[in-house]
Image: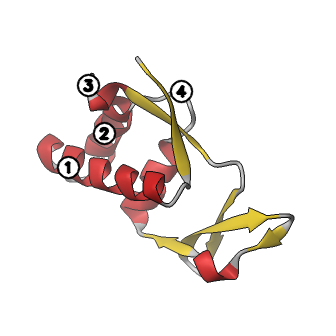
Amino acid sequence: MNDLAKIFAKNENIVFRQVAGEVILVPVRDKVADLKCIYTLNEVGAFVWSNINGKRSLAHIIDALVSSFSVNPETARKEVSTFIGQLETKKLIEEIRAL
């Protein structure tokens, strides 16, 4: 199966916030933030995170990234695939289906 056809959804227990110019992800469990597991995203990571919505494929997210930033498609594919893998490993997102 083509990995670029995969579609991911965000873990509902993750809060995305912009604080003092930084973008952070904070896991929330039992209505309490897990401050030991705060993740800071750069501008590109925040862009990718904002495009994960349970409807867009990785190919769509990569195309949007290439259109919005000065990056070639091959570099974008590699970086997004790596980042998605990290988010998935940390259980911040989950694959819901592939096209």
Task: Give the quadrant of the C terminus.
Answer: top left
> Label 1 is placed on what type of residue?
Lys
Q: What element carries label 3?
A: loop
- Left or right of 25? Residue 64 is left
Q: What element carries label 4?
A: loop
- Residue carrying label 3: 2
In this view, 51 is above or below 91: above
Q: Is mark 2 on a helix, strand or loop?
A: helix
C-alpha span from label 4 to label 2: 14 Å
- Left or right of 15? Residue 86 is left
- Residue carrying label 4: 55
Viewer-nearest of discs 2 and 1: 1
C-alpha span from label 2 to label 3: 14 Å
Q: Using a 10 Å C-alpha cutoff, classify the residue at mark 4 as few (fewer than 14 neighbours), some (14 to 19) or many (20 or more).
A: some
Viewer-nearest of discs 1 and 3: 3
> Label 3 is placed on what type of residue?
Asn
C-alpha span from label 2 to label 1: 10 Å
C-alpha span from label 4 to label 1: 21 Å
Q: In which quarter of the image is residue 2?
A: top left
**Residue 62 disc label:** 2
Q: Using a 10 Å C-alpha cutoff, classify the residue at mark 3 as few (fewer than 14 neighbours), some (14 to 19) or many (20 or more).
A: few
Q: Nearer the viewer, residue 96 or 55?
A: 96
> Label 4 is placed on what type of residue?
Lys
Task: Give the quadrant of the N terminus.
Answer: top left
In this view, 57 is above or below 39: above
Q: Which of 56 and 13 is in front in this view?
A: 13
